[in-house]
């Protein structure tokens, strides 16, 4: 017999697989970080359902919290979050094409 808790776990596991696949095919790094953050949140929920609150807290704090913040800092440092640079480069390339 299938109870509500098992249905919830199967739905969450399906979401985890979807997140894993989406993170590998995403082209934008920011989108990938957000997907991985949601993966960690769902994994934390699964740990709560499986009655392991210590692992759930650790997963939420480290997986969704600290790791995501570090990823955002790295993306900012390498310039992946700065859209103004991309617009300037795009405008320069369009100007050079127009001048030719």
Image (spheres, rainbow, N blue to C red):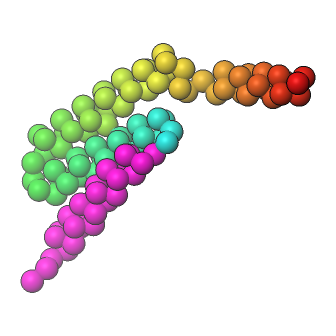
Say which of 97 and 72 sits in front: 97
Q: Is residue 84 visible?
A: no
Say which of 88 and 10 sits in front: 88
- Asked if residue 60 lies left or right of residue 38, the reply is left
> Where does residue 15 sit, x and y in percent of width and height?
32, 59
Q: Residue furthest top?
A: 77
Q: Residue furthest right?
A: 99
Residue 40 falls inside the magenta stretch? no
Question: Residue at (22%, 67%) from the top-left corner?
Answer: 10
- Asked if residue 85 lies left or right of residue 13, the reply is right
Figure check: 75 above or below 36: above
Q: Quadrant of the C terminus?
A: top right
Say which of 68 and 22 sits in front: 22
Question: Residue at (39%, 27%) from the top-left corner?
Answer: 71
Question: Residue at (34%, 58%) from the top-left corner?
Answer: 18
> Where does residue 89 sit, x and y in percent of width and height?
71, 22
- Asked if residue 28 lies left or right of residue 61, the reply is right
> Where does residue 7 sit, x and y in percent of width and height?
21, 72
> Where does residue 29 sit, x and y in percent of width and height?
47, 35
Residue 8 falls inside the magenta stretch? yes
Figure check: 10 above or below 28: below
Q: Quadrant of the N terminus?
A: bottom left
Magenta residues, start to end: 1-26
Say which of 34 and 86 sits in front: 86
């Amino acid at each position: 017999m299938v109870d509500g808790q098992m249905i919830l776990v199967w739905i969450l596991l399906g979401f985890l697989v979807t997140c894993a696949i989406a993170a590998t095919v995403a082209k934008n790094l920011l989108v990938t970080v957000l997907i991985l953050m949601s993966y960690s949140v769902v994994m934390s929920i699964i740990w709560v359902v499986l009655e392991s609150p210590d692992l759930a807290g650790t997963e939420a704090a480290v997986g969704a919290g600290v790791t995501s913040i570090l990823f955002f800092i790295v993306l900012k440092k390498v310039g992946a979050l700065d859209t103004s640079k991309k617009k300037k480069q795009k405008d320069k390339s369009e100007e050079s094409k127009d001048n030719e």
